[in-house]
């Protein structure tokens, strides 16, 4: 009795993960020099994120967040800033009761 012929199967294909919306949408120029800006991403990065950061798609910002962290960096002069959208979202997430003074980010 002979074994039936086994046909090789194609290797599974993996599609690259789409860029997060905020990486694609925010393309405003640097407020200091007018250069191209990149998103700053926070949190524990995957290996793929390390590779994409090395390729210059965005910048890794670490794992600690606070109400005043920057979310954009200039690829030309290195200036970092926070967009108004992120500032409002962070304040709502980190200070849901409004206990932080907007001029003093330390808890009162």
Image: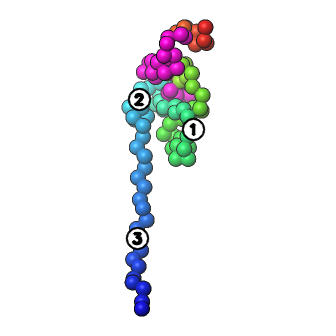
Q: Residue 79 sits in which quadrant?
A: top right
Q: Could one spot residue 51 in this view of the protein?
A: no
Q: Residues within 10 Å of mark 1 (few under 14, many from 20)?
A: few
Nearer the observer, 67 or 60: 67
Residue in the foreground of this view, choosing between 27 and 8: 8
Which residue is the site of mark 2?
Answer: 26
Q: CA distance from mark 3 to mark 2?
A: 42 Å
| Residue found 52% across the figure and 20% down from its top | 94
Along the line of sight, the residue nearer the viewer: 66 or 29:
66
Query: x%, y% of residue 103?
Result: 55, 8
Instruction: Work out whether residue 16 can be spotted.
Output: yes
Mark carried by residue 9: 3
Mark 2: few, some, or many residues within 10 Å (few <14, many ≥20)?
A: some
Left or right: 7 in relation to 63: left
Question: Which one is in front in this view, the residue at disc 3 or the one at disc 2?
Answer: 3
The circle on residue 58 is: none
Mark nearer the N terminus (3 vs 2): 3
Q: What stretch of residues is rendered in magenta?
A: 71-100
Q: Nearer the viewer, mark 2 or mark 1?
A: 1
């Amino acid at each position: 009795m002979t074994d039936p012929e086994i046909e090789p199967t194609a290797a599974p294909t993996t599609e690259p993960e789409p860029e997060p919306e905020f990486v694609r949408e925010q393309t405003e120029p640097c407020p200091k020099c007018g250069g191209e800006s990149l998103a700053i991403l926070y949190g524990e990065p995957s290996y793929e994120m390390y590779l994409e950061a090395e390729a210059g798609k965005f910048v890794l910002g670490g794992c600690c967040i606070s109400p005043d962290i920057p979310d954009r960096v200039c690829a030309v002069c290195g200036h970092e800033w926070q967009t108004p959208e992120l500032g409002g979202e962070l304040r709502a997430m980190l200070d849901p009761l409004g206990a932080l003074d907007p001029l003093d980010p330390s808890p009162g």
